[in-house]
Image (spheres, rainbow, N blue to C red):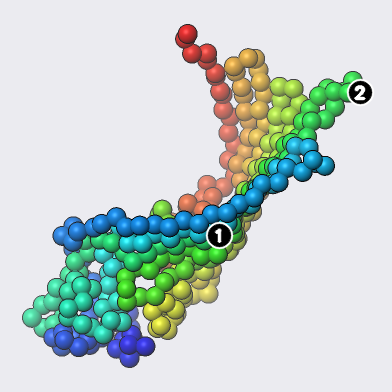
């Protein structure tokens, strides 16, 4: 509520006036004019809490079938990251906290004589918390065929695995609400890569048919669509969502298929021929809230259909 009353959008710039600071200040929507990254504040590792429960099913009426299901809830208090969650969250955290000059978030600003901000101190420090909650499931089935009626023995294998996120996000500081990034891409989200997408659903499936020295494998990968992270970011701050072009606010879901055939030429020597991205699906395209090349290369295939050949030589170690 405080952020709504103190903030007013003016073109591509945000202007605010906070109590206890000289004549307010100005910062661009992309952050401060300059950002200092130092390690002046002391970081401390803090406790974490994990709850998991799972089940495995191997029914006697279906030999070769294994079904597993796991629920997890992981919470980390005071993880180490960029102070306050970065320049944008430091600015809004200071405002949401009432602009208290004793607040460490407000003390991060270095102002000029006219009150304008010319740098923000962003050392490594402890954030508020991280949380990931969801379900992992797997279904594996192996069936041996032939061999009893004179036919050459062969086998089929199916492996289906998937993840469903209920939550995957963070609270950067005490003054800003929890930001749930499940189903979103771009800043301020991203797990191992800043801005990378976090689909709510991810599936990875594989089917393999083996006949003697020959094995053919079909792989399938699918993930659900995601929305621009600025939507959940502004919701957490309680401010209006910026105007995002319709063609860039959503990254579509994708199905990818890979096909490979392996031949055991002789003992210890395997030849594999295959094609990745069999249907030549192109990556979803977005605008400025990207990871790289107007998309998320950590999730989407940016190379298109491609063929490969590999040779694997296995040698016995010396006794």
Question: In the displayed structure, would residue 40 be above or below residue 241?
Answer: above
Q: Position of residue 197 (x, y in %)?
A: 48, 60
Q: Earlier in the sequence, mark 1 or mark 2?
A: 1
Q: Residue at x 33, y 85 (%)?
A: 3
Picture coordinates of residue 261, whole percent (x, y)? 67, 31
- Residue plotted at (41% across, 83% down): 238
Task: Find residue 4 and report its image quarter.
Answer: bottom left
Nearest to the eye among marks 1 and 2: give it. Answer: 1
Mark seen at residue 134? 1
- Residue 151's label in the rendered image is none
* Total labels drawn: 2
Q: Residue 18 in the image: state x and y as whole percent.
A: 22, 86
Look at 32% across and 62% down and name the residue there.
Answer: 78
Measure the C-alpha gap from mark 1 to mark 2.
Answer: 47 Å
Q: Pointer 1: residues within 10 angstroms few (<14), some, or many (20+)? A: some
Apparent side of residue 99 relative to residue 78 in the rendered image (left or right)? left
Looking at this rendering, what residue extends furthest in the bottom direction? 5
Task: Say what secondary structure mark 1 lies in.
Answer: strand
**Residue 294 visible in the displayed image:** no
Quarter occupied by the N terminus:
bottom left
Residue located at (54% from left, 18% from top): 314
In the image, taking residue 119 as reference, residue 208 lies left or right, namely: right
Identify which residue, 13 or 93, lies in the foreground.
93
Which residue appears farthest toward the left when viewing the image?
A: 113
């Amino acid at each position: 509520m405080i952020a709504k009353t103190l903030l007013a959008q003016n073109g591509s710039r945000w202007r605010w006036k906070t109590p206890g600071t000289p004549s307010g200040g100005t910062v661009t929507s992309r952050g401060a004019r300059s950002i200092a990254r130092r390690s002046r504040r002391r970081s401390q590792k803090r406790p974490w809490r994990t709850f998991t429960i799972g089940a495995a099913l191997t029914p006697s009426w279906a030999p070769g079938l294994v079904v597993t299901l796991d629920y997890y809830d992981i919470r980390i208090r005071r993880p180490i990251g960029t102070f306050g969650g970065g320049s944008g969250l430091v600015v809004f955290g200071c405002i949401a906290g009432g602009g208290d000059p004793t607040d460490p978030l407000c003390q991060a600003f270095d102002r000029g004589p006219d009150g304008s901000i010319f740098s923000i101190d962003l050392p490594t420090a402890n954030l508020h918390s991280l949380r990931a909650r969801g379900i992992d499931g797997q279904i594996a089935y192996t069936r041996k065929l032939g061999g009893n009626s004179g036919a050459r023995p062969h086998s089929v294998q199916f492996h289906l695995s998937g993840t469903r996120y209920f939550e995957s996000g963070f609270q950067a500081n005490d003054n800003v609400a929890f930001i749930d990034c499940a189903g979103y891409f771009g800043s301020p989200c991203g797990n191992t890569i800043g801005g990378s997408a976090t689909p709510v659903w991810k599936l990875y499936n594989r089917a393999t048919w083996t006949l003697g020295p020959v094995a053919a494998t079909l792989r399938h990968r699918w993930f659900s669509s995601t929305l621009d992270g600025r939507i959940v970011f502004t919701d957490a701050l309680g401010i209006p969502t910026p105007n995002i072009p319709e063609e860039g606010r959503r990254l579509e879901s994708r199905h990818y298929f890979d096909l490979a055939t392996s031949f055991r030429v002789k003992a210890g020597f395997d030849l594999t021929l295959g094609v990745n991205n069999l249907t030549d699906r192109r990556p979803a395209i977005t605008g400025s809230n990207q990871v790289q090349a107007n998309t998320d290369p950590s999730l989407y295939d940016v190379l298109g259909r491609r063929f490969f050949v590999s040779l694997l030589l296995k040698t016995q170690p010396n006794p």
